[in-house]
Amino acid sequence: MPMTSPNPPFLLSVNQLHAGIEDKPILKGIELKIKPGEVHAIMGPNGSGKSTLSSVLAGHPQYTVTRGEVWFNGKSLLEMEPEVRAREGLFLAFQYPVELPGVSMTNFMKTALQEQYLHQEREPLNAKSYLAYQKQKQAEVQLDSRLGSRSVNEGFSGGEKKRNELYQMAMLQPKLAILDETDSGLDIDALKIVAQGVNALRSPDRSFLVITHYQRLLEYIVPDVVHVLYNGVIVQSGDAALALELEKHGYDPIKARFQ
Amino acid sequence: MSQDVLESHVNSEYKWGFSSDVDAETFPKGLNESVVRALSAKKQEPLWLLEYRLKAYRQWLNMSPPHHWANFKYPQIDFQNISYYSAPKKLPSLKSLDEADPELLKTFEKLGISLEEQKRLTGVESQIAVDAVFDSVSVKTTFRETLAEKGIIFCSFSEAVQEHPELIKTYLGSVVPASDNYFSALNAAVFSDGSFCYIPKGVRCPMELSTYFRINAQGTGQFERTLIVADEDSYVSYLEGCTAPRRDEHQLHAAVVEIVAHTRAEVKYSTVQNWYPGDADGKGGIFNFVTKRGICLGDHAKISWTQVETGSAITWKYPSVILKGHNSIGEFYSVAVTNNHQQADTGTKMIHIGKHTRSTIISKGISAGKSHNSYRGLVQVRRGASQARNFTQCDSLLMGDQCGAHTFPYIELKDSSAIAEHEATTSKIGEDQLFYCRQRGLDPEQAVALIVNGYCKDVLNKLPMEFAVEAQKLLSISLEGSVG
Ligand SMILES: Nc1ncnc2c1ncn2[C@@H]1O[C@H](COP(=O)(O)OP(=O)(O)O)[C@@H](O)[C@H]1O
Ligand SMILES: [Mg+2]
């Protein structure tokens, strides 16, 4: 297998990806190409495979890839352990962030950052500069500093958990951030804060894959490309206007066409 | 949880498993009355103590090993195949370490136990006085003079028998009678050494006291005896650590610890138990049968047990508190980790006798590999212990699906105004928790260490600072190899 990507202009290149759980196929030939700096949105009805796609890209051991390949920043993604993918700059904001009782946020993020720096052969931050960095990032995503000193997600409200995902993203500065329904369950104010956070992090060398069920979020995070995922395949791609169209007609026409 | 992720593959490395070539005097194997007499003579004990031993020995002969645990499997112990005394021939003198066997000094150096009284820059508060016990004898007790200035007695048990016989006579067996159980009877008959500590009235012990137990000799058992007496209005924090070489055969450790807390006295007793646990196939390891008990004799006395149990092939211990004084307090904070083929049956007994007595029990059991981990606890409120309160929180964490966690709470309330609350949870380290950590760049071992340490936080917080750091590391090491 070649060690470098045949498609250097893409940060992420997903080719004919098939994956499932146990014997059940869920992703059935995903094609997806994201250039550095681009924001892509994936929409689709519940159960179409959006979370599965994000989990497979992040390397969740529960899923089995049966076919296809994925290139990330010139490297073969599927051959890497999940933690290596993370250290290489892939970040997943979980749809359902888990609680880690008794594990302090600071300890957790410090360890995560340390591993990333080690991997990138950078000088790790000392305690003082770490705390300054943490403070700056908490301010950036308007995370209540009290949350930052609690245990990871323990007793956080739904909105606080989502905000915490965003904070971790800001801390880790990924090359590709996948946001799995970060907007779901948020009221409009919380959603705006999430959108602001994402927009503040947009940069020419950072790409986003924004998974959402609703068009709502895309009013605040304007995507370069919108894809529709249905039944494990991307059935339609277009620009931001596609999202508006889906909003108007719902998913029924898509379901009818691709049943 | 998928097998491939959490099944154990690698055996963790027991870092304290080296053995030392120390020239020792060792009794031939076997146990009978003349062995008990020889032991007592060796230590030049007074007659009353010899009689105490002999009485215990005769009681022991008529007792049988405890077998109330259904989950335990272990080979019968051949008590005739154990040597009951082994001591290095060249021990340091009171004044200097020079006369000691260099191998002996090297051993403690390797274990990170300081036998020198280094003055640390941070002052007396962070100093730790150590009684170092090697097989059947105490090698050295540091800071004796500093402590003596405050009237504190801290020395080996054998010395205490010679120098403070009245105290030993008063308190020995007063909390754990020889006849209490099979192993306490055995210990009373053949105990070799251990620590003695007395804090006089109104004295706050200025440093942590600690005993470090090292088993070295092959084919021996270790039967140490510790006695702590805290007189009125005194305070002491006591630490206990232990390790043993990696050996293929099982070795027996049957200790007794007694604590007496007088009116308004407070004793904190912390243990990091790290005896050799045996290898990944369950070969070797220490059988750890220990009786630890404290009594709050006076009103407003307080005894806290904190333990981190990571070692031993089998652990059987129930550090307990008899709450006799009114308004006295008993606490038990425990983390017990079992991996591979280890078995632990541990918990506590809180006996409420005085009025307004309170007890708290926090137990965290973590099982990995093919191990079994049981919490067994008794909360007993006697008639007349009005307004007694107990709170018990008992959590089990499972790693993988070949291990077992069991909870046996016994609650006996004989006073209608008493309240005992019991909460229990069982959880697994979720694959989703593990994945969440890995997605942030942590490798599986780091993730497990972080999750487990978080899970045990309430208990680890109770340990003295330096011990807590060591305990955290130990937890990670004990669970090494429990994720694939
Ligand atoms: N852990 C799982 N076990 C069994 N089926 C699953 C699991 N995860 C997802 N699926 C199935 O895969 C399909 C896609 O699910 P998911 O990726 O969560 O969709 P979406 O995020 O688009 O709502 C659904 O039919 C769902 O039932
Ligand atoms: Mg989903």
Image: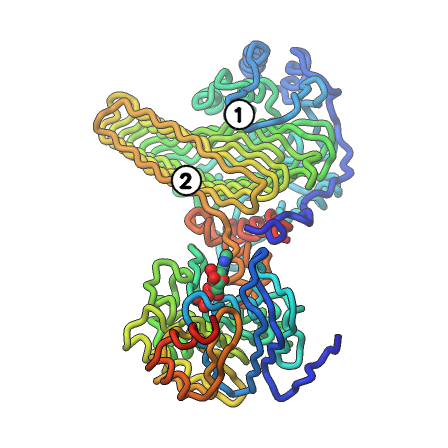
Q: Quick one: A153 or A181, which is closer to the camera?
A: A181
What's the distance in space between the residues labelled 2 and 1, CA to CA? Answer: 19 Å
Residue type, numbered disc 1: Ala
User: What is the chain letter for disc 2?
Assistant: B
Q: Give the labeled residue for mark 2.
A: B394
**Percent x, y of residue B121:** 52, 59
Q: Is residue B385 left or right of residue B293?
A: left
**Pointer 2 or 1: first along the chain:** 1
**Percent x, y of residue B325:** 30, 28
Q: Quadrant of residue A241?
A: bottom left
Residue shown at 38% from the left, 69% from the top: A162
Q: Quadrant of residue B446?
A: bottom right
Disc 2 CB within 8 Å of nearest ligand 1 atom: no
Q: Is residue A79 left or right of residue B52?
A: right
Residue shown at 54% from the left, 18% from the top: B182
Q: Helix, strand or loop at disc 2?
A: strand
Q: Is residue A68 visible?
A: yes
Residue B344 against residue A21 in the figure, above or below: above
User: What is the chain letter for disc 1?
Assistant: B
Label 1, residues with CA under 10 Å away: few <14, some 14-19, many ≥20:
few
Q: Give the labeled residue for mark 1.
A: B70
Q: Quick one: A29 or B268, which is closer to the camera?
A: A29
Quadrant location, the N terminus of chain A: bottom right
Q: Helix, strand or loop at disc 1?
A: loop
